[in-house]
Amino acid sequence: MLNCNSMHLLFALFIIHILFCSSRGQLLVGFYSQTCPTAESIVRSVVDETIKQDPGNAAVLLRLQFHDCFVEGCDGSILINNGAEGEGGAGGNLGVGGFDIIEDAKSKLESVCPGVVSCADIVALAARDAVSSANGQFYEVPTGRRDGRVSSKTLAANLPDVDDSIQLLKSKFWQKGLSDKDLVLLSAGAHTIGLTACFFMQKRLYNFTTTGGSDPSINPGFLKLLKATCPFNGDPNVKIPLDPVSEFTLDDQIFLNIKNGLAVIASDARLYDDNNTRRILESYIGSERSFQADFAEAMVKMGKIDVKTGSQGEIRRVCSVVN
Ligand code: HEM
């Protein structure tokens, strides 16, 4: 039998548990349905408009969510303009964009529901809308993220790098609670749209081996093509499609490309180096439907990395500046 003191203790623990859980909160599909019912449609119309102007913006917005979530969790910290010392100043964030698109959606949202919708949620919703506009499967995005207040270059030092080994790529994803399957789906899956700068190809094309050779996994005919587009000492800013076969369509094509030595960046090629990631990759070749469903699931999972909810963080008024 519990005596009166133990009952009080249990009751106190129960209250602490309730307070702790409610301050942490949780993500919910339709989080803004009462507080800002038009939130998702406003984001959608901004995304549709920007992709109508430039179809390449779908890839820009998809990449933005990855770079947001991998540093300090999905908290919109990538958007904070903290100069060279901020996240944006980290080498791994080179070329990341879409900030103005998120800011545009934010200012429209502030005019209808001020102080309600977080920048972090706008990033997640915009990535979802970008995926579906690029022919990817539509998925529900659980919302309720709150914005972080910290943006630091040092915190972004450990982003996955294009020249990482497969072991390192796997471990960087594990550290974020993502599996080998998520690594294959998210990195190769996302790279089925968008571009890379020749800058990221240099090592792979001209300095992969100790004798200055190229990555032997590249198909010889494709290597010639890549070298012609990205010559040694050429302009590092020239851009080429990550999926030369279907640049604007989010589909399972890239898995076949990788198998055939047609991966453009090294980190995609590395997915074929490891037994487990190779097996996963091959399972999606010609399996468009399961790729679409699993990619959507992996995006939702990535969108939950270290989120701030409840009373944590803040709802920024302007995405580039903390309140
Ligand atoms: C293994 C980890 C990854 C590495 C090493 C990596 C690396 C890169 C690199 C080097 C580029 C070219 C950037 C440029 O030239 O500006 C790129 C582009 C891109 N990445 Fe990744 N990435 C990874 C994972 C992801 C993930 C998880 C996503 C999203 C879910 C993603 C989405 C994209 C998209 C859509 C582009 C094209 C961007 C554009 O056209 O502007 N990447 N990535």
Image (tube, rainbow, N blue to C red):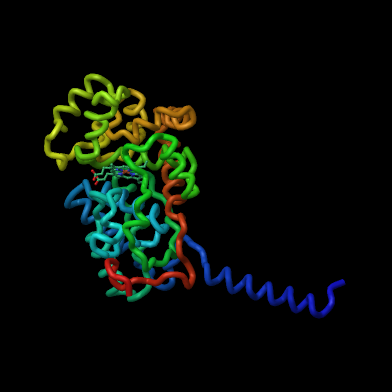
State the image coordinates of residue 302 (x, y, percent, origin top left). Answer: 43, 50
Q: Farthest residue in the top direction?
A: 220
User: Looking at this view, is 191 or 81 the one in front?
Assistant: 81
Q: Residue at x 58, y 71 (%)?
A: 20
Q: What residue sits 15% from the left and 31% below the top?
A: 232
What is the x, y in percent for residue 165?
A: 39, 35
Measuring 43% from the left and 62% from the top, which residue is drawn there? Answer: 143
- Which residue of the protein is positioned furthest toward the front in this rendering? 210
At x 22%, y 61%, the residue is 100
- Quarter-wise, where is residue 183 in the image? top left
Quadrant containing ligand 1: top left
Give coordinates of residue 96: x percent, y percent.
Answer: 26, 51
Q: Is residue 28 above or below residue 67?
A: below
Which quadrant holds the N terminus?
bottom right
**Above or below — where is 33 with respect to 243?**
below
> How far across and how far down the image is residue 246, in percent?
26, 34
Q: Which residue ends up furthest to the right in the rendered image?
A: 1
Task: Tell me which corner region of the image, top left, top right, bottom left or bottom right, holds residue 293.
Answer: top left
Quadrant location of the C terminus in the rendered image: bottom left
Residue nearer the viewer, 232 or 258? 232
Callout count? 0
Between 164 and 81, the one nearer to me in the picture: 164
